[in-house]
Image (cartoon, helix red, strand yellow):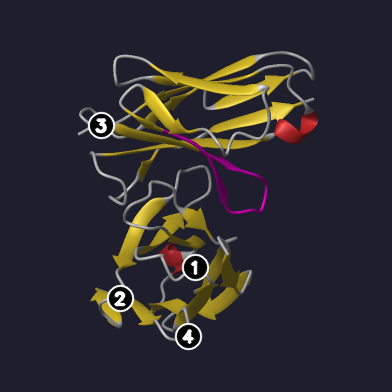
Amino acid sequence: GAGVSQSPSNKVTEKGKDVELRCDPISGHTALYWYRQSLGQGLEFLIYFQGNSAPDKSGLPSDRFSAERTGGSVSTLTIQRTQQEDSAVYLCASSPFRPGETQYFGPGTRLLVL
Amino acid sequence: QQQVKQSPQSLIVQKGGISIINCAYENTAFDYFPWYQQFPGKGPALLIAIRPDVSEKKEGRFTISFNKSAKQFSLHIMDSQPGDSATYFCAASMQSSYKLIFGSGTRLLVRP
């Protein structure tokens, strides 16, 4: 079946602009995760959704970052007033139900803030 | 205590050789240790995973060795192939938790 999809695949924006990144998880997966991968670095956890609720937002770097999930499916990560240090690959993953299960990753959105 | 330390940062191996990547952790509450493989422009994909009740798990050419007392685990790629050239990430989590704590990654290049 279809895997996790993310859009756009690439995004170039100017410092100070807002951006929205979209994630479509695997159908039926109730858990959804956002990670950030900076150049040459490992993956940094941002936020986790179980259904439409986000029990843990502690990984979000600042209050410029927010995320929502609707209908237990699509999620949007919004970065307001982007800064150059926000440039990274933003990865979304989903898993069937319970924490600790295999997480399936999307291809990521490559964000470049000029 | 939440960190997972991965080494080496990069690795070059000849075709047919053995690739070995090591990871170490501090948090003894971790009980799930996956390895992810990432090709350029793609998201990470689960390669193999282990839980601490076993010391070794093998799937084809890929083997995880786990040393609970040393809080270390490693990935061995036997008969390495050029198609194995990718970045490999170890990770750890608690079964009761939801977030993976990733190592910093190892860029593997397998020369023909």
Say which element carries label 4: loop
Identify the magenta region: A35-48
**Whole-percent x and y of residue A69?**
40, 19
Q: Nearer the viewer, mark 4 or mark 3?
A: 4
- Which label's residue is closer to the chain start, 2 or 1? 1
Kind of residue at disc 2: Arg
Q: Which residue is mark 3?
A: A2
Q: Which residue is mark 2?
A: B61
Kind of residue at disc 3: Ala
- Which label's residue is closer to the chain start, 4 or 2? 2
Q: CA distance from mark 2 to mark 3?
A: 27 Å
Q: Which residue is mark 1?
A: B27
Q: CA distance from mark 4 to mark 2?
A: 24 Å
Vertical comparison of A21 with B43: above or below: above
Magenta stretch contains residue A38: yes
Is the same chain shared between marks 2 and 3? no
Say which element carries label 2: loop
Whether residue B40 sits left or right of residue A48 in the image: it is right
- Check disc 1: other Cα within 10 Å, few if <14, some if 14-19, many if 20+: some
**Residue appearing at x 48%, y 80% in the figure:** B20
Q: Are marks 1 and 4 in contact (CB under 8 Å)?
A: no
Q: Quadrant of residue A96?
A: top left
Whether residue A33 sits left or right of residue A102 in the image: it is right
Magenta segment's dominant SS is strand
Q: Which residue is mark 4?
A: B70
